[in-house]
Amino acid sequence: MLQTILTRRSIRKFTDVRVSDKDIEDILKAAMAAPSAGNSQCWEFFVINKREILDEIPKIHPYAQMVTEAPLAVLVCADITREKYKGRWMLDCSAASQNILLAAHTKGLGAVWVGIYPEEIRMNGMIELLNLPDNIKPVSLIPIGYPAEAKSPSNRFDKSKIHFNKFLK
């Protein structure tokens, strides 16, 4: 698992090879295994694999151009009517989003986290595009596919960001 975490990179270029239904289901199983506040599991996942919908997304989100190459994207949302602790839905969906990225990498797929929340224009655009009800709040969009680029692992370890017990100047 540590190797998966340390070698995962954001992939923004994809081949046109279809991702299997089994791989999508496995990735979503990993997403739903994420922790959530009070075990609320308030997430909802929208698998977007229709080209005409994927091609509309960059009109909503200026940094989502890669979806035009990806065979699919998962929109991670929260059903706020199911949250047990107010305001924690974004944290729950973020944990699920990270699990999606790791599961995709484990399967040899590439993925990238495209932030939707808290940008109202992006949230409202996705709500309108997918006809989401008022209780469903988009958090992240994760394009997934077979990578058409290779990236070396990135060493982001920085001891200066580790503190024990108290912040010392």
Image (cartoon, grey):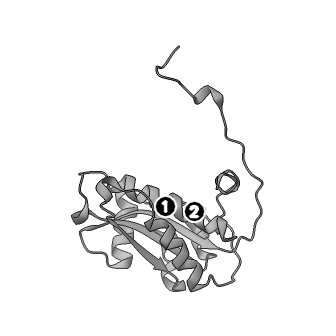
Residue 97's label in the rendered image is: 1
Dot 1 alpha-carbon crowd within 10 angstroms: few under 14, some 14 to 19, many 20 or more: many
Q: Which residue is mark 2?
A: 101
- Location of residue 137 by image quarter: bottom left
Number of callouts: 2
Dot 2 alpha-carbon crowd within 10 angstroms: few under 14, some 14 to 19, many 20 or more: many
Residue 155 image position (x, y, % from top left): 72, 43
Q: Amino acid at mark 2?
A: Leu
* Label 1: which secondary element: helix
Residue 114 at least partly seen: no
Q: Amino acid at mark 1?
A: Ser
Residue 19's label in the rendered image is: none
Residue 7 at least partly seen: yes
Residue 128 image position (x, y, % from top left): 34, 74
Looking at the image, which residue is at 48% across and 19% down?
167
- Location of residue 90 by image quarter: bottom left
Q: Nearer the viewer, residue 150 or 83?
A: 83
Quarter placement of the N terminus: bottom right
